[in-house]
Image (spheres, grey):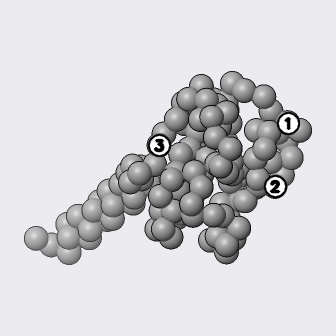
Amino acid sequence: MDTSTIINIVLVALAALFLYSRLAPVKGLKNLPSQDFNSALQGTKEGMLIDVREPGEFKGGFIPGARNIPLSQLARRLDEIPKDKELYLYCRSGMRSKTAAKLLAKNGYRKLAHLQGGIGAWSGKVSR
């Protein structure tokens, strides 16, 4: 094998690894469609609803009761999030909330759920 073939194989392997790390399911994360997410929120007094979008996005409309902890700040604000409560995460489309769930899972959080499709799929009330 020549050098360019080896480089191409390594690049393809790295690209595949990157895609897998982005799209792989998060262990223990509940992916809830809008109706189930809303039912879960209504059925809990102990849960915490977290919007992981940036503050400007949050101001444009959020699910009532949500706390804004942007994904960009999440790692340094873990002390604000209790480990014993069910955490309900959402973002605009579902990608950032899934990334947030991975970060939380790595830090010992086990009761995680996120809104499949993000706030764009939300059918409940939105506060402004």
Q: Residue at the spot x=62%, y=34% of the render?
A: 43
Which structural element holds mark 2?
A: helix
Any part of residue 34 in sight: no
Residue lying farthest left? 1
Q: Position of residue 93 (x, y in %)?
A: 61, 40
Label annotation for residue 127:
1
Residue 38 locus on image (x, y percent): 64, 31
Is the residue 15 above or below the residue 120 in the image? below
Amino acid type, label 2 = Pro
Badge 2 crowding class, 10 Å Cα cut-off, few under 14, some 14 to 19, many 20 or more, is: few
- At label 1, the amino acid type is Ser
Q: Secondary structure at mark 1?
A: loop
CB atoms of marks 1 and 3 within 8 Å: no
Question: Residue beneath label 2, please?
Answer: 55
> Residue 30, which numbered label?
3
Apparent side of residue 47 relative to residue 109 in the rendered image (left or right): right
